[in-house]
Image (tube, helix red, strand yellow):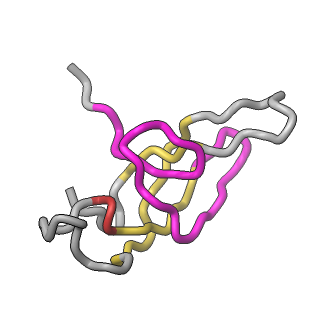
Amino acid sequence: MIPTVGRIVHYQNLGDKDGRYPPETQAALITGAKLREPAKAHDDAPCSEACYIVDLHIFYRTGDFFMLDVPYNPEATSGHWRWPERAS
């Protein structure tokens, strides 16, 4: 799925250095999306999420935060965005 402005995604925050606050999943809104270089996947397949970096408006319980140029990872990886899991 191609990321577009206005879509809700999950952002895995970084947590803190000393581990007191571990990384958590936060709701985020895509505010910008652009293609990374190169514009094709390694096997010349059409581009997917991994070909894009996005700008996010991240929603925390204590306030909002903005991140630019956030990469995609389908797994919960600190500093990356992913699509929310679908309910079964």
Q: In which quarter of the image is the C terminus?
A: top left
Image coordinates of residue 56 in percent, x first then y, are 51, 62
Q: Is residue 86 above or below residue 4?
A: above
Q: Nearer the viewer, residue 63 or 71?
A: 71
Q: At 41% across and 49% down in the image, what residue appears?
A: 73
Q: In which quarter of the image is the N terminus?
A: bottom left
Image coordinates of residue 50 in percent, x first then y, are 33, 60
Q: At 62% across and 64% down in the image, what residue appears?
A: 66
Q: At 36% across and 43% down in the image, what residue appears?
A: 74
Q: How many labels does the image show?
A: 0
- The image quarter in which residue 84 lies: top left
Outermost residue toward the right in this view: 18
Q: Which of 84 and 76 is in front in this view?
A: 76
Left or right position of 35 against 32: left
Image coordinates of residue 38 in percent, x first then y, are 31, 79
Q: Is residue 21 above or below residue 56?
A: above
Outermost residue toward the left in this view: 45
Outermost residue toward the front in this view: 43
Image coordinates of residue 75 in percent, x first then y, are 41, 38
Q: In this view, does 87 lie above or below 27?
A: above
Q: At 60% across and 64% down in the image, what residue appears?
A: 67
Residue 68 located within the stretch drawn in magenta: yes
Q: Which of 27 and 80 is in front in this view?
A: 80
For the record, the magenta segment spans 59-85
Residue 76 located within the stretch drawn in magenta: yes
Q: Is residue 68 above or below residue 20?
A: below
Left or right position of 40 against 17: left
